[in-house]
Image (cartoon, rainbow, N blue to C red):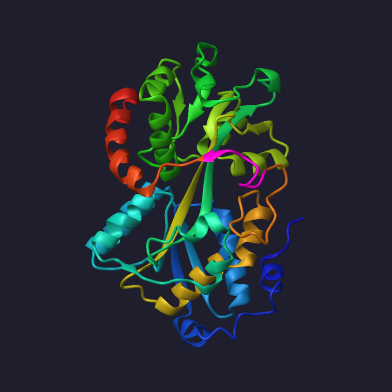
Amino acid sequence: MLPSAGAYAQAKGPTGTDDPLYPAAKKEGQLTWYSGILDQPLCVQVGQAFSAKYPGIEVKPIKNSSQVALQRLMQDIKAGSMQADVFTTTDVGHMTFLNSKALLVPYVAPSASGFVPALRAFNGGGLYQVSWVGQVTILYNTTKVKLEDAPKDWPDLTNPKWANAITFGSPNYSGLVGVWTVGMAQRYGWEFFEKLNKLNPLIGRSVDDAGTVLNSGERSVAAGNPASALRSAARGNPLAMIYPSSGTLASPSPTAIMKGSSSPNAAKLFVEFLAGREYSQILSDNFEQPMRADVSPPKGAKSMAEIKTFAPTPEEIEKELGPNKEKWRDTFGG
């Protein structure tokens, strides 16, 4: 059994009430978190752990795919009612867009100094910080595919033998899938996706949909999120993952405080919590990649130092993702 939410708070002491932000944050009493990362139950667990550490402050997590989360955020802004205090996305381009509208509150969480060195500089000059490292690897259904027959690298997915057998998400809904399309197109050209289209792929929305489809047996191989696959396998489902030999896509996901937030102090306290050890431990215990050097990687996974990784730069994502979405519609029809 995993530790309770309160157990994480007790790792550094019973509460965080000695934090200078706490009195003002407690008066605000709550915060709303629009999250494009994790799943709803895990977002709830994070919120509960925060509330255990900072009594009297409730977190209202609202989980959507990153593109949908941004759409909801912009609808709120258009309506003149900022609902989100904290916004997390898998698409760093969203932060560039929001900053161009002067919608981000600069804030550097003190605990961010404990991030692994490779993640400390991912902060947009103090406008946001990393709150999740999304990865895309190769997944497969172990009842349908043997390890020796499974794809070992990205080009292997385009083998005709995977016709009617492959699944993945869409960049029009998932920020992480969007980053993956940029990375794949940079490495293999858009021909990579044209070859995949010939295999009649089943295309979901979220990066996590791939695991659900594999569990159903409807498809047998996928490009997907290793964390959700490991969680599912731990529950007895027939899922396994392979780190591609040429490199795993690893994409940091940013969190920022929204201008016009009704709970600015609680928002800062929550961003501080997301940079701390308790949160990274929750991630690791739930098979997600921790961001801090003082937290070990989850069981069945490797640390970022052990695997070959790659990622497009924020500038490349901003420049190439839009055109890639158009190509995606032309190629896959949606």
Q: Position of residue 307 (x, y in %)?
A: 62, 40
Q: Quadrant of the C terminus?
A: top left
Q: Position of residue 179 (x, y in %)?
A: 41, 41
Q: Position of residue 244 (x, y in %)?
A: 58, 30
Residue, far right? 1
- Give the total number of marks visible in the rendering: 0
Q: Residue at x 50, y 75 (%)?
A: 269
Residue, far front? 117
> Looking at the image, which is closer to me, 62 or 220?
220
Residue 227 visible somewhere in the drawing: yes
Q: Which picture quadrant has residue 276?
A: bottom right
Q: Is residue 292 left or right of residue 265?
A: right
Q: Residue at x 69, y 23 (%)?
A: 147
> Looking at the image, which is closer to me, 73 or 198?
198
Q: Residue at x 62, y 75 (%)?
A: 53
Question: Residue 182 lies in magenta, yes or no?
Answer: no
Relative to 275, residue 141 above or below: above
Q: Which picture quadrant has residue 185?
A: top left
Magenta stretch, residue numbers: 302-309
Q: Is residue 133 left or right of residue 71?
A: right
Q: Is residue 74 left or right of residue 145?
A: left
Relative to 206, residue 294 above or below: below
> Looking at the image, which is closer to me, 219 or 252?
252
Residue 170 visible somewhere in the drawing: no
Relative to 60, residue 168 above or below: above
Q: Position of residue 37 (x, y in %)?
A: 49, 52
Q: Quadrant of the N terminus?
A: bottom right
Q: Which picture quadrant has residue 142?
A: top right
Question: Residue 306 lies in magenta, yes or no?
Answer: yes
**Majority secondary structure in the magenta region:** loop
Q: Residue at x 59, y 86 (%)?
A: 18
